[in-house]
Amino acid sequence: MRVSVTVLYLCLAAAFANAAKNLVLIGGGLADDNLAIWNEVVNLAGGRGVAKIGVVTTASDDPWGRYLYYDNMFVNEYGAASTYYVPITVNTTDKNSDPDVVDSIQQQTGFFFGDGEQTRIIESWFLSGRVESPALIALKDTYAAGAVIGGTGAGTTCLSSTVMVTGGLSWSGLVYGSCNCTSHPDDPNDGLTYDPDGGLGVIDDVVLDTHFSESGREGRLIRLLADTMGLSRGAEVGVGVDENTAFVVYDIGTSSQRGTVLGENGVFFADMDHAHIHFNPFDIEHVDCHYLTEKDEYNFLRDEVTYASYKKNLIGDEMNPNAETSSDVFSNPTRQPRQYGEFRRVAVNLLDSRDDSHTCGRSYMSGPYYYVDFTQIEKSSAAYGNHPNYGHRLISYEDIHIDIDQSSHPNCGL
């Protein structure tokens, strides 16, 4: 995975240098019985009977209720020694400077940020003027000393120091662009918005998004990267984590640093290094995209993907003669019944076809339509997958080129 994960390595390695550190970046929708992910958070926090998890439910509109859920899951279901309710919410922001809270944070061996609205986390964990609160400083220091940080949904999105997405759908983002605002003037309901000051600052130089493939957020991530990568907190790399899935980065800052995908779906990487961008109207060419699935591992120092042992090169083992298309490539929620994960479906189907190296998809929303071209590149693209008898077909790919514009292509069939 040539560029995107290399940049991801650099940003993660630079985050802290004092001790080996681990991050569990979950895309939301974490199932109660996802043993691999729950157990990994507990293991990285010290293991069963040892792990002390600080639970941060600031993003939720019911912080105490969500804490009780996580307390039950971590302690009763997955064997953590204890949990600590971190009492910092939008209604108790003063707790971010409470010495007792700071002391309790320093006693934890791991932290878990729950889902909800990431803006609540920013509002609650910083002092006025976007100054880090004593609680945030303590959390970062404890992490630097080896405590794991896990997050799900908004609890992952908030962890980067780069611009932080706060809302919006792909089609609206492509049409109207992103806005440094709380409500987009051209589309108050679905407009693409972001915080230019970023998140909590645990990860540098990578934009994070979650609930990803299921919600068709590929377009909004690519547009946000295009609009903001020239800013002081912009980035050329975006990572989108699917639901019930985690991207776990181990031993950050050491020679053993590696990332592994755990869970049901996958992790999407968008690399803008070679992209050609035009505005008014927006179109973009040559976005390098990658997608890794369960048990695929990336070695940051060797810049090398090791695919799960049960997957094999799809050349000669494709399941379909031709690639498919989609008339709802960004899974628009107004379409009923909603078609979840259409971008992912089209991309992996292309890699699983014998005769095609190109396909496309179209937005469900019109005025204008936006089209996505998916292209395999000879000697560059790679795809590995498992046999469907494994349970369900899982396909990982590297270096598919994506173009997005308003032009219908003759081979698209849409």
Image: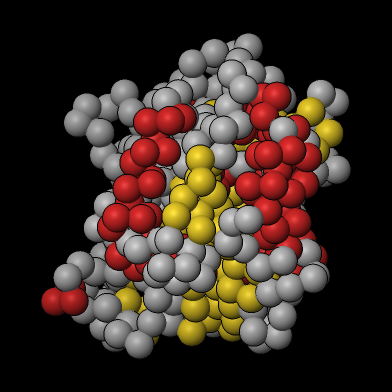
Q: What is the x, y in percent for residue 79?
A: 35, 63
Evaluate whether residue 182 shows in this view.
yes
Nearer to us in this view, 80 or 382: 80
Q: What is the x, y in percent for residue 175?
A: 57, 27
Q: How is the image coloured?
A: secondary structure
Evaluate whether residue 201 shows in this view.
no
Q: How many marks?
A: 0
Q: Could you tell me which residue is drawn at 56 percent across and 58 percent down?
A: 110
The residue at the far front in this view is 100
Q: Could you tell me which residue is drawn at 45 percent across and 71 percent down?
A: 47
Query: On the rendered structure, is 184 left or right of 337?
Result: right
Nearer to us in this view, 257 or 332: 257
Which quarter shows the N terminus?
A: bottom right
Query: On the rendered structure, is 192 left or right of 202?
Result: left
Which quarter shows the C terminus?
A: top left
Nearer to us in this view, 200 or 318: 200
* 129 lies above or below 47: above
Q: Could you tell me which residue is drawn at 49 percent across and 21 percent down?
A: 190
* 14 lies above or below 402: below
Q: What is the x, y in percent for residue 252?
A: 68, 72
Q: Could you tell me which residue is drawn at 25 percent across and 33 percent down?
A: 338
Q: What is the x, y in percent for residue 359?
A: 39, 56
The residue at the far left in this view is 389
Query: On the rendered structure, is 219 left or right of 125?
Result: left
Nearer to us in this view, 163 or 280: 163
